[in-house]
Image (cartoon, grey):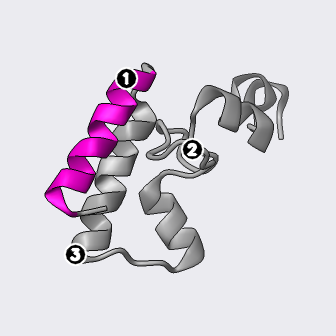
Amino acid sequence: MTLDEIATAEPLMDRRTAYRLHLCVDCRAVTAAAGMTRCWPCHSDWSGIRLRGRRARAAAIRAMCGQLRHPGLIALAWTITVVLGID
């Protein structure tokens, strides 16, 4: 590696920094769920889990809940999932 490559290379992100910044460790996108270090596509590729049907819809709503910052909005989004029956 040359000095130019080292200077322009993206620094590696450790898990603690990724968790604190709510970023995916692999693709550096915003994580899809609170408490995860990978977004759903990267997590499913990494673990082999494929979500379908009701579970996929529930994961999408939990992903939206993870992006909300206000506790009231999180509670509202979670209540909507329960009312719609996709919890």
Q: Residue furthest left?
A: 84
Q: Position of residue 12 (x, y in %)?
A: 76, 38
Residue matched to label 1:
72
Compared to residue 16, the image places residue 4 above or below, namely: above
Q: Nearer the viewer, residue 6 or 11?
A: 11
Q: Position of residue 56 (x, y in %)?
A: 29, 67
> Which residue type does callout 3 highlight?
Gly
Q: Nearer the viewer, residue 12 or 8?
A: 12
Q: Is residue 25 visible?
A: yes
Which quarter of the figure is the N terminus placed in? Answer: top right
Image: magenta residue range: 71-85
Compared to residue 68, the image places residue 86 above or below, namely: below
Q: Kindly state the secondary structure of the residue where label 1 is placed.
A: helix
Foreground mark, 1 or 3, reads 1
Gap between marks 2 and 3 measured at Cα: 24 Å
Q: Position of residue 4 (x, y in %)?
A: 76, 25
Residue matched to label 2:
24
